[in-house]
Image (spheres, helix red, strand yellow):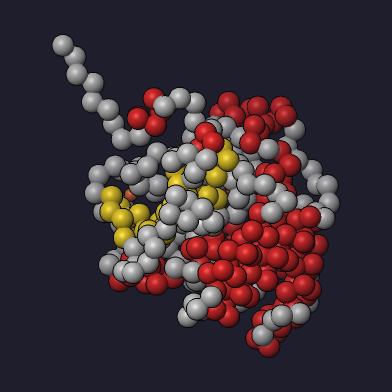
Amino acid sequence: MTTTIIQPGEIEKLAGEIPFVYIPSRNGIFHDRAGRLRTLAHDHSMKDFLIFMANLCEAQQAALNDFPDVPLPQETQLKLCRAHGMPPLSVQSWQRDPAWQQALRKIADRVQQHATPASKETIARLQHMDSAALEMLAGAILSGRYEDIDLAAAPFVAAALQVYWTHMTTTLGVRAFGRNDISNLCPACASAPVASVVRIGGGEQGLRYLSCSLCETQWHMVRVKCSNCESTKDIGYYSIEGSSGAVKAESCDECGTYLKIAYMDKDPHVDPVADDLATLALDLMMDNSGKSRSGPNLFLMTASDPAA
Ligand code: FE
Ligand code: FE
């Protein structure tokens, strides 16, 4: 008699066809994030920061709503990428359209109304940068070279790049993207995930998706597996004492990293970026235990970011 041992994740596979890619609705993605940030800001020790981020997300939604048409990969290219497990909008090779800089100016103008004097200064600096300087800044952010950039200006640039890439992924739709050869990077743009989300509803019920730090694409990865090195051994889950448990740090002893995981069954409104920003205490706790983050939050770049 042959005994088959079911490996972690295979139970999910047996459950039938799994939607590999999930892309949130273009109409509300950043608006919903702003709402989540405002909710999380109530009685939060970092209230002002979270409200500022909410304003930034609202500005992102406005920029996305009237983003102009830009060149996109043709179907033949997309087909080739799907066949070879390559992300068609890779941050390393995709030729950026300067339209993202228009989005940056719109975002900066809008955020300025509610900005602190320090942020106003940063925005003024950005508004004086020429196109080449902005492209250099964008290139450094997208390749994780945070040491030699203006870190105060970086979140605004990242916000505009998120809008540009989200415009492309939401225009192309889920069918454009296949499985990436490197399963811990985004199948659309090859960026690392900001966090993962255990989703509810429809075909995604109970499934874990990694959420791209740049383009909002979410892609399936089985649970209880390190999203960085794919080890299934010694995976631990940590949360702040007294929290709802909707956000935990999934940590791996094998590669010494962690990434947060948000559970929609504990709170249906969790958002990978917003909930990550509101749980910095968990990052401090993980940092103190010697673990480093495996993926960045582009609103929180630091010169020593381990994702760099
Ligand atoms: Fe992506
Ligand atoms: Fe690992």
For residue 284, side relative to residue 64 (left or right) = left
Residues 90 and 300: in front is 300
Image height of 129 relative to 81, above or below: below
Q: Quadrant of the N terminus?
A: top left
Residue extending farthest left = 1
For residue 197, side relative to residue 121 (left or right) = left
Image height of 207 relative to 175, above or below: below
Residue extending farthest bottom = 117
For residue 244, side relative to residue 163 (left or right) = left
Residues 80 and 166: in front is 166
- Residue depicted at x 31% and y 69%: 241
- Residue depicted at x 67% and y 47%: 25
For residue 41, side relative to residue 8 (left or right) = right
Based on the displayed image, in which of its 4 quarters is residue 233 positioned? top left
Q: Position of residue 212 (x, y in %)?
A: 55, 50
Q: Position of residue 108 (x, y in %)?
A: 75, 72
Image height of 256 relative to 168, above or below: below
Q: Determine if residue 139 is in view.
A: no
Based on the displayed image, in which of its 4 quarters is residue 251 positioned? bottom left
Q: Position of residue 276 (x, y in %)?
A: 48, 63
Residue extending farthest top = 1
Q: Determine if residue 206 is in view.
A: yes
- Residue depicted at x 42% and y 58%: 246
- How many numbered badges does the structure rendering display? 0
- Residue depicted at x 50% and y 38%: 204
Residues 18 and 85: in front is 18
Q: Position of residue 104 (x, y in %)?
A: 75, 65
